[in-house]
Image (tube, helix red, strand yellow):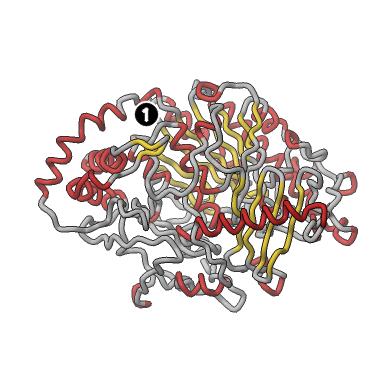
């Protein structure tokens, strides 16, 4: 009870200041008392104590993280401990952040603030049943090109194609740092990798971060997460206790596994549980049951369903789906070099089998929404954390700045709020934009800590809040794309038409994605594109300057955040 009260009060205090477009932010004149109340509520939300928050803020690289004694480490892979940091609500450098200040002020001041703010709070959140539900379905490594609706000549995705026919589709949705943990941390926090700090896999997201789970929970939503998490950083098969669940109540999660046919998860108990059969199907059926259960409550809910496939291993989909594809009949993208053709055919057949299995899964989700009467007023979002090169450019998997790696599906289906006619929008969106956009769609306040853009007005037919360009980066190469495998740091911009990328040596890639959608002609130095190259270079410089990105070698960021990595730059991932 006190949790709900403080949570609501926190949101009202935190976001009850002056409106600015769709964002509502704390202002300096809201006062110390309000900060005190918000700090208490947010610390309670985060499972901490209001007096213990340090209030430390950071907008990398201006304020390096404070060192933490090794003795406090809960995991071998990290040097940092988040246990004494602030609420995560604040945004560094703004001078008006809220929460985690930890000041020992009198409780009566908080009570006065509560009395003043409760009426507005109740008005803001009285509409309960009319607010949309949210169902976010996230696939792993499903590139934007691999759908029937996107023109793939091979894959069978009839349910996704039907979904696209009644959805708003963002055709230039980008995974700016196209690898797992960084993208998922951005989905949750609405922040960029250098702000949330998860710029390599298998390092922990601050448990005190302000996340979409906490923001929606505070807006009186029920919250649930089923499937793959991968921002806990305490081992891929380890139990994740409630204080590290970032505001999600219903919980059936594994940090990370790709053993889809023998897949474990944890609920509230540290005892391992097992998904039966192919995990995505079982996870989907659990989500369906969640929908049935929550359709009756009248309280809005937000459910995240995060599948492991179609990420490799490619050949582990159920036989009925593998039987749909023969490697020798597949049409490959023309940017797959001859030397990679045979291997790519075999991989693609398995990849598509995963895709078709998931297509049946999304069909089950939609059937359940229809059966329960939830379809009209549920925002059903489908996306992926990044794509897969699958032989294009002679490369595999992700982390590279090419379209097969960075472009992801992004569909918003919400008949009541967005209509049921298909629409395609071309503004480039990025991972950090999902959280504020979802909050915007359901009318919930957007925390000051968010750096992403709120595209909810754009989805409704208004102007894009962006400037037509979004940033691509690799902070530090690791894992499947370490330096031995050609991995390197880069920064780039993706616009509706062009891709322009620099590595530490200088300009690296420049494509006209409209004229050359397979990105086979690097235009660097082409006299016909000299003026545009100069514009793109200036655009990239401006974007990096605006976000304070000095584009340093990756080791500098590893050191500054205190992440422990092996000789290849990879964090340990032992369960
Ligand atoms: Ca992934």
Residue sitting nearer the eye, 246 or 270: 246
- Quarter holding the N terminus is top left
Q: Is residue 58 above or below residue 112?
A: below
Q: How many labels, in total? A: 1
Residue where numbered disc 1 is placed? 299
Residue 574 shown left or right of residue 53 in the figure:
right
Q: Does residue 470 appear to the left or right of 217 in the view shown? A: right
Residue 238 is at least partly visible in this image: no
Is the residue marked by circle 1 packed among few (<14), some (14-19), or many (20+) residues within 10 Å? some
In the rendering, at what x and y percent does residue 125 appear?
A: 31, 29
Q: Is mark 1 within 8 Å of ligand 1?
A: no
Q: Residue at x 29, y 39 (%)?
A: 17
Query: Looking at this view, is 535 or 244 the one in front?
Result: 535
Residue drawn 64% across the image and 53% down it: 493
* Left or right of 103 on screen, residue 228: right
In the figure, 111 relative to 476: above or below?
Answer: above
Q: Can residue 435 be seen from the camera position used here?
A: yes
Q: Position of residue 471 (x, y in %)?
A: 59, 53
* Residue 356 quadrant: top right
Q: Residue 440 in the image: state x and y as whole percent.
A: 45, 35
- SS of the residue under disc 1: loop
Q: Residue at x 29, y 37 (%)?
A: 16
- Residue 18, image x, y percentages: 31, 37
Measuring 33% from the left and 40% from the top, which residue is drawn there?
218
């Amino acid at each position: 009870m006190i949790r709900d009260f403080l949570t609501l009060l926190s949101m009202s205090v935190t976001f009850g200041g002056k409106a600015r477009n769709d964002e509502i932010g704390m202002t300096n004149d809201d006062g110390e008392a309000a900060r005190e109340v918000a700090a208490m509520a947010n610390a309670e939300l985060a499972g901490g104590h209001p007096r213990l928050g340090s209030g430390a803020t950071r907008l990398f690289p201006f304020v390096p993280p404070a060192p933490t004694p090794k003795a406090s480490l809960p995991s071998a892979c990290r040097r940092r401990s988040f246990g004494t940091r602030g609420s995560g609500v604040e945004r560094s450098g703004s001078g008006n952040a809220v929460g985690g200040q930890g000041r020992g002020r009198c409780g009566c001041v908080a009570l006065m603030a509560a009395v003043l703010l409760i009426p507005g709070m109740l008005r803001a959140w009285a509409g309960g049943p009319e607010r949309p539900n949210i169902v976010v379905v996230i696939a792993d490594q499903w590139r934007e090109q691999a759908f029937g609706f996107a023109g793939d000549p091979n894959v069978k995705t009839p349910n996704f194609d039907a979904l696209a026919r009644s959805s708003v589709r963002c055709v230039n949705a980008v995974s700016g740092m196209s690898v797992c943990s960084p993208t998922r941390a951005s989905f949750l926090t609405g922040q960029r990798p250098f702000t949330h700090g998860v710029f390599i896999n298998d390092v922990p997201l601050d448990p005190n971060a302000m996340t979409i789970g906490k923001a929606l929970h505070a807006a009186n939503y029920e919250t649930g997460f089923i499937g793959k998490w991968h921002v806990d950083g305490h081992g891929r098969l380890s139990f994740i206790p409630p204080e590290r669940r970032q505001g999600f109540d219903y919980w059936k999660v594994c940090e990370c596994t790709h053993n889809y046919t023998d897949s474990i998860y944890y609920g509230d108990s540290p005892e391992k549980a097992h998904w039966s059969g192919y995990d995505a199907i079982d996870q989907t059926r659990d989500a369906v049951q969640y929908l049935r259960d929550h359709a009756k409550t009248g309280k809005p809910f937000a459910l995240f369903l995060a599948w492991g496939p179609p990420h490799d291993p490619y050949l582990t989909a159920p036989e009925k789906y593998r039987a749909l594809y023969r490697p020798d009949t597949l049409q490959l993208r023309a940017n797959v070099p001859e030397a990679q053709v045979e291997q790519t055919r075999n991989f693609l057949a398995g990849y598509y089998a995963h895709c078709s299995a998931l297509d049946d899964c999304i069909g089950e989700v939609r059937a359940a929404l229809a059966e329960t009467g939830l379809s009209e007023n549920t925002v059903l979002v489908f996306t992926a954390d990044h794509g897969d090169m699958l032989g294009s450019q002679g490369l595999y998997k992700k982390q590279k700045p090419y379209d097969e790696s960075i472009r992801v599906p992004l569909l918003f289906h919400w008949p009541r709020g967005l209509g049921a006619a298909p629409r395609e929008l071309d503004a480039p969106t990025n991972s950090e934009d999902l959280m504020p956009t979802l909050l915007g769609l359901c009318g919930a306040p957007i925390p000051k800590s968010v750096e992403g853009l709120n595209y909810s007005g754009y989805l409704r037919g208004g102007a894009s809040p962006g400037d037509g360009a979004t940033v691509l980066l690799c902070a530090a190469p690791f894992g499947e794309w370490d330096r031995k495998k050609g991995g390197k740091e880069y920064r780039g911009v993706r616009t509706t038409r062009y891709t322009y990328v620099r590595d530490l040596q200088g300009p690296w890639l420049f494509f006209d994605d409209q004229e050359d959608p397979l990105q086979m002609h690097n235009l660097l130095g082409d006299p016909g594109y000299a003026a545009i190259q100069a514009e793109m270079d200036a655009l990239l410089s401006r974007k990096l300057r605006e976000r304070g990105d000095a584009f340093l070698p990756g080791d500098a960021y590893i050191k500054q955040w205190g992440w422990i990595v092996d000789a290849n730059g990879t964090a340990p991932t032992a369960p």
